[in-house]
Image: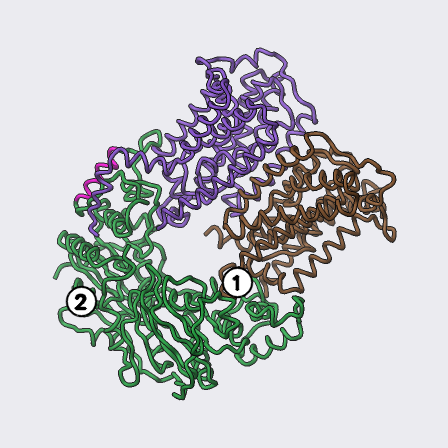
Chain colours: A purple, B green, C brown
Amino acid sequence: MSLTSTDIRSGSHLRIGLSWLLRNHIWVFLALTVAVFSLASPYFLTANNIGNILTQGAFIGILAIGMTMVMIDGEIDLSVGATLALASALAIGLQTHIGIWPAVFVGLLSGAALGFLNGTLVALSGMHSFIVTLGGLIGIRGLVFVYTGENALMVPDFSYTEIPEIYLGPISMTAIIFFGLAFFFQWILSSTRHGRETYAVGDNIEAAHDAGINVKRHKIINFTLCGTLAAVCGILLSMRLGTAEPNAGRIWELWTIIAVVLGGTRLQGGFGSMWMTIGGVLTLAVLRNGLRLLNTPNYVELMVMGAVLILALVLDKLLKRQEAT
Amino acid sequence: MSQAILKVEGITKTFPGVKALDNVSFDIRPGEVHALVGENGAGKSTLMKTLAGLHRCDGGEIFYQGAPLSLSGPLDARRKGILLIHQELSLSPELSVAENIYLGAWQTNRFGMLKKRELRRNATTALEALGCGFGPDVRLGTLSVAMQQMVEIARAEAFSANVVIFDEPTASLTDSEKDQLFQTIRGLKARGVGIVYISHKMDEIFDITDRITVLRDGQVQGTVDTADTDLNQITRMMIGRTLDAYFVKAKAEFGDEVLRVEGLSKRGLFSDASFSVRQGEVLGLYGLVGAGRSELVETVFGVRRADAGRLFWKGREIDWPTPRQSIDMGMALVPESRKEQGLVLMMGGRENTSLPHLRRFSDLTVMNRAREMAVYEKYRSALSIKTTGPDQAVSQLSGGNQQKFVLAKWLCAEPGLIILDEPTRGIDVGSKSAIHELIADLAEQGLAVIVISSEMPEVLGVSHRVLAMSEGSIVAEFKGDAMTEEHLIDSVSHAREPVAAE
Amino acid sequence: MEQRVGSVLRRHGLIIAFLVFLVGVAVNASAFLTPGNIMDVLRQVSITGLMAVGVTFVVLTGRLDLSVGSLLTLLTVIVVDQHNVVGPFPAIMMTLLAGACIGAFNGVLVGFVGLNALIVTLAMLSFLQGLVLFYSGGSNVNVENAQATWFAVFGRGTFLGLPVPVVIFLLGALIAGLVLQFTSFGRKVYGVGGNETASIFSGIDARWTVFWTYVISGLATGVAAIVMGSRVMGAQNTIGQGYELTVLAGIILGGTSLLGGSGSIWRTVIGISMLGFIQNGLLLLGFPYYVQWLVTWVIIIIAVWIDLGAKRGRIFA
């Protein structure tokens, strides 16, 4: 075999498209789901409903963006649900004391700080992030309860809930923020030094270290980003609901992991993208929305989700095996 | 004679218990290919890792372009113009070719953005200089191993390297890919780059190098011009010690055939391997790392599945066994890596010894501690293993004692065939000769023994018969007087079209 | 040798800290270290404790089971509901069988198909929550003849002055501990967790070992569900929510390594009991219940940090 690999060089657009689809097989799945539900329900493909799907998906989506960064690094963050709750509680609870925007800022800061703490613990101790952030999940939820005293906090001025009530056609501000962030982070992943390093670190941490990448600092940055995005999600949620429940975001970390893994990003690290995550998030949102539209009881949704996740895993394993041969 | 570009003077490197480099001096001139040869463990890889900034030396000095050199790490070495091209590639499959060439040394603008255009332009220049047929934007993971290696070599262009170190670069290349590589090396050479070439394959070394430095036991045995030397001289320098001095060979009294393998093949690993071994016989299996020796015996033992071939146990043809069935039949495999395949490091010697024979040491699944202890104690004293107790984690033992526990674990089942894969790698001299004596003992007790080793004196010293394996095939068999190091080296150093292609 | 003394000291460090905590609480709340209160604590931890005993097997092989919380809910609903339909004994058998089957399903996917344990059991968590709602139709179930049935003995009875849940928990822990320490299966579990490759080279079929640990985890959750159903005499759809985290926290706190191969049942018993005492002590001191979460967080971090101290150099060179 010669080193001149013409088939790669002159790869037609069709070939490139196919290989993109093989890596982003979630989009095929998304198309299928959309097709099935639009046949099953006349309301599914209405502008209104699509707007709903996007808004509903955006919350998990924003969490999933941070989770993707962390997961390409080969780590995981289980504490995003609790972080979201704390940010939302602070953003609402502090409004009477320091005003709306400072409160929102403090909420964001809390997410960044907790992400920084997670990242520091993971990087410096060498503990697996699963344990560190499992502790975070339990402990941060404790913080939320300490702060709220078990009560839902109400927003003092309901103009706060009107902040995200801006629509671009049927698409809500929240959805726009999600897509904006997703594109921004895809840009980070594909075009910045930090983003490219993420793949190198996740694929082979020792090689990355040898190439002069500061692995510890790198991981701390990604955990901080993940925590900050969780806070963004929490603040948008508080704006939407006008209240901050101490139990907000419970088991959302699971939905987030499901969305990211469904998209095709691998837990082992080194592989994934925001395109995949957007696909995973939308598929999840379409499934949930479509099943509800069909008036299926909510247990079907949970069972379908579990089954789909395992299928995604099996599919990924098969594709990987094919790639290897 | 041109001035040396890199000069190593009297460097020493000690690892706990081992002096890996002992007062090593050599130099690399611009525009020459300098071979570094020696047996496994002679210090080649330590030396090149020191040059590439992965190790720091304990003593001595390195001069680079006339000035003393100190490196903070591999990236620093690369920036200064010293590039190591590893056996295992240090590339990231999800990144593009251009990004991999400059891995870790990316130019960014104020916003942390990669200067992609510049990156691509520089990478293209580097790739074109090498005549690579792929562009800078291809995702690395889609390239073949040979192409990925070209990406590493492209770093030499990109960083305008003055010294490039190749470590076994042809290990996974086909013949035509190898020719391409040699062309590239000659191109680098023509531009005045100093090249260090590490390989086990003598024909390659005589083909492409200008000078040869031989290392043995961490010391330089000498540097010679390739044109003025021959295989015999190099081999003598590599081996250097008197043979048979401390090897005990079992009496050659053979019984019935225990194992026969016919036409065993596994795609990409080995092909059409046939051999047999008899009671009381020690069969040596010699080959370089990567020749497929370990994979071959692991397949016989049942850890891997074969594509084709037949297996006869004590004259009867049998189906491919699982490891469990192999053990029950009376086969034992002392694997190549004792830490990864041989022992559960957190367990003590007692539990490790009984691990393959849990059924034998239990009554209705309840472990019989007395029986377990008795056997443990028997083999611990027979092999004189030093521990503080039966439950001391084996991770705390020396390499030699660990290896003896691996042996104990397999001997206590009193097998009919024992396969020893590199049984003395990385252990002290005392334990080494104890294991050699044990091999002779076992054979005289009537066991069939297969010994795999890449140390020629060892494999020649303990075996009655030696098979030479190269690139997945058994290429030669030597008996009696034909068992010499020269013959062995000769048989495995002619690179053939490997079965590992594709 | 020095290393060993060091590691013993490190381990004792956590226990000493815990003893200091116990004394501190006892000084401030006289009811804390009374036999009655201790029994209360043990009764509270017996359900998570039983689950933790089962999950310890899985963790020892270096894998995870996050589905036990949802499984507890499902099995509690089953045992309570079937009690009304087929009577207590068949209901108990069905519960144990269902637990073993779902464990076996996890075991096939993780052990034989080789899928990532975290994701598989996460998917199972979701699936089982759905199954609960499907089974119960979203409503709570109750034991109808709560006064008349002998089923109450598991959650509410006493045996030789000890609450039956505590007896079941300790008995389960004892059996599990004996199995791990003294049987060939136990050896295989430690072998696979400590070094899977070496175990395969030793003729152990790691797939089956992993499979059985998940079956045990499912069975143990079945026993916990029987105790839970009997104690509450009913079941809500959220009864086991979050238990998987408590269980894991207890196991980690006890010092069983998530990497596999190191740990034991008695460590799990200690870990999960420590959680119980911390919770109880904080409540007695007048803290709201959720403060224990904060404390657990800090303790897990410290515990693992201490445990990793020796290995740190190796993991993060």
Q: Amino acid at mark 2?
A: Phe
Task: State the residue in front, B391 or B374.
Answer: B374
Residue at figure coordinates x 18%, y 70% from the top left: B224
Left or right: B130 as drawn, with respect to A86: left
Q: Amino acid at mark 1?
A: Ser
Could you say where residue C101 lies in the image, as x and y percent from the top left? 63, 48
Residue at figure coordinates x 58%, y 57% from the top left: C209
Question: Is A54 a magenta residue?
Answer: no
Cα gap from disc 2 to disc 1, whole angstroms: 44 Å
**Element type at marker 2?**
helix
Quadrant holding the N terminus of chain B: bottom left
Could you say where residue B219 lies in the image, as x and y percent from the top left? 30, 70
Task: State the residue in front, A6 or B52.
Answer: A6
Residue with the mark numbered 2: B206
Task: State the residue in front, C107 or B61.
Answer: C107
With respect to residue B32, does A229 lie above or below?
above
Task: State the residue in front, B22 or B429.
Answer: B429
Residue A255's tag is none
Quadrant holding the C terminus of chain B: bottom left
Q: How many marks?
A: 2
Could you say where residue B466 lies in the image, as x and y percent from the top left? 33, 78
Left or right: B78 as drawn, with respect to A155: left
**Element type at marker 1?**
helix
In the rendered structure, which segment of residues is drawn in magenta?
B117-128
**Badge 1, how many Cα within 10 Å: few under 14, some, many 20+?**
many
Residue with the mark numbered 1: C199
Left or right: B485 as drawn, with respect to C88: left
